[in-house]
Image: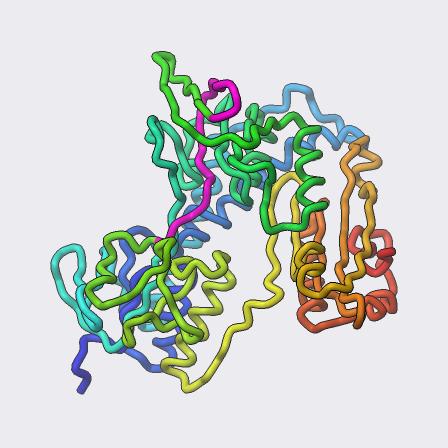
Amino acid sequence: MSDHDYDLFVIGAGSGGTRAARVSAAHGAKVAVAEEYRVGGTCVIRGCVPKKLLVYGAHFAEDLRDARHFGWDVPDDCAFSWPRLRDNVMKEVDRINQAYTTTLESSGAEIIHQRATVTGPNEVTLADGTKKTAKTILIAVGAHPAVPECPGHEHGITSNEAFHLDAVPRRILIAGAGYIANEFAGIFHQLGSHVILLNRTKEILRGYDLQIRDRLLQISLMKGLEFRFDAAFQGIDKGADGCLTVHMSHHDPVTVDAVMFATGRKPNTYRLGLENAGVELDEHGAIKVDGDNRSTCASIYAVGDVTNRIQLTPIAIREGQAFADNMFGGKNTKLDYDCVPSAVFSHPPIAGVGLTEAQARATLGSVKVYSSDFRPMKNVLAGRDERALYKMVCDGETDRVVGIHMIGPDVPEIIQAAAVAVKAGLTKAQFDATVALHPTMAEELVLLK
C-alpha cells in the first residue's frame, strides 16, 4: 500500500497539466489535479483559442470591403455587433472547457476545484486547509500577463480582460511590441479602434526575422496604426470623463479610452510555496528544471510556461506527455526544442521556423538567402497594395534549409508543413525538385530565387 494519497498530484489544469494527468492515469497512476479557476488553462480560457476566434471575426472587416471587388454588394452601413462576437466566443470557450473536464474525468484523474500550494516535498495544502500527499508533484500553473509598476496601472487591462469588454474602445493604447501586442492591435484596428502601440525599444517582435517584422511594421503604419518607439511607460491619469491619459518618456501624453498591457508574461510561482520544498527559481521567477523536467527538489517536476522555456501550448502538451510516459510508462523520451514553428496572428500574419537570417549568419557563417516578394492574387483583385514576403535561409556549405520565415495571408497554415521539411533537414535542391501547386501562395516555397 502506498505511503501517499496519490502517485501524482498535479497543480494546474492547463494544456501541460491535463495532458500529464490524463496520460499518467492511463498508465495506471493514481492522479489528482488541483485547479483554482477553470480546466483548460490560458490557451483554452483566455489565450490562443478565444484570441484566434477574435482574429477570425476581425478579419471580416477587410473581407467585407474586398467583397465588392469580387462582385458582392455589401451595404456601406453593414453592422458589427461586438457583444454577439464576444458572447459566441465565450460559448465556444465554455464548450472546450467542458470537453477538457470530461476527458480528464473519464481518464480516472480526480479534479479538485481549489488552489493548491506546496507545503513539503511530497505535500500540498488545498485552499480549504486539507492536506494531500503524493509521491510526485507536478507544477503546471502557467504564467500571467506582466503589468508595469507605475502610477495608475490599475486603470489598464491585459489580454485576460480584453475578451470580456463591454464595448470595443474608440481609442486604445497597447503597451508592448511582442506577438500579443501586435495581434490585439490588429484585432482592435479591424473592429474600428484607433490603435497606438507603445514600445520601450526601437523594434517590434524581437526574435523574428528582421525583414519580416519590418514588413509588418510598414503595413501596420499604412493601415493607420500608430507607434511610439523608445517610450518608457510612466503612468496613467484617469479623467472625470473616464478617459485615460498615458504619460511616457520622449513623447507627448496621449488620451485614449482604454490601455492594454502586453508587456510579457511571468510564471505563476508567487505564493505557491515552492520554497517549502527547496524548489529553486531563476531570476524571472521560473522553476529551474533539468532535461527530465525535474526541479531542484527530487520529487517535484514542472512543465509548461512556469518553466519559461518556450511559452507555447504544443510545447506544454509535449512536456506533459513526456513527463507522464517517462514517470509511469517506462519510456525515456527527450524533447527536442529545435525547429519549433511559431506564428503571430497579426493582420497580416507572420510565421516562421528555424534560424532567422541574422541567427544563421552568426552561427553558420556561410549563408544563402532566397526570397519572394509578391502581391497575393486576392490582394491584386481587391486593390490592396499589401505584399507578402517569403524567405528561405540555407546553410551556404550544405544547401540545407535552416529557416523559413513568411508574412502574408494564411502563412501560419503554410508554415506547419514547411516546419516538417526544415526539421527533416531538407535541402534547397529538394524544394526546387518539387512541382509547384498553382495557383497558390504556398507554391512560392518551391520557386524561391
- Relative side of 275 to 258, left or right: left
Depth check: give the residue in front, 292 or 34. Answer: 292
Location of residue 308 by image quarter: bottom left
Q: Position of residue 258 (x, y in %)?
A: 44, 26
Q: Is residue 10 above or below residue 409?
A: below
Q: Position of residue 419 (x, y in %)?
A: 67, 64
Location of residue 187 by image quarter: top right
Residue at point 44%, 36% (across, down): 261
Residue at point 78%, 55% (across, down): 442
Q: Is residue 212 above or below residue 220?
A: below
- Relative side of 399 to 19, left or right: right
Say if the magenta span includes residue 408.
no
Q: Position of residue 151 (x, y in %)?
A: 33, 27
Identify the image quadrant of the N terminus.
bottom left
- Relative side of 266 to 437, left or right: left
Residue at point 71%, 55% (across, down): 357
Q: Residue furthest top?
A: 240
Location of residue 427 by image quarter: bottom right
> How many labels, in total?
0
The colour scheme used to paint the residues is rainbow
Does residue 292 appear anywhere in the picture?
yes
Depth check: give the residue in front, 20 or 71. Answer: 20
Residue segment shown in magenta: 249-267
Does residue 99 appear anywhere in the picture?
no
- Relative side of 432 to 164, left or right: right
Identify the image quadrant of the C terminus.
bottom right
Residue at point 69%, 51% (across, down): 411
Q: Position of residue 202 (x, y in %)?
A: 59, 36
Say if the magenta span includes residue 250.
yes
Q: Residue furthest left?
A: 129
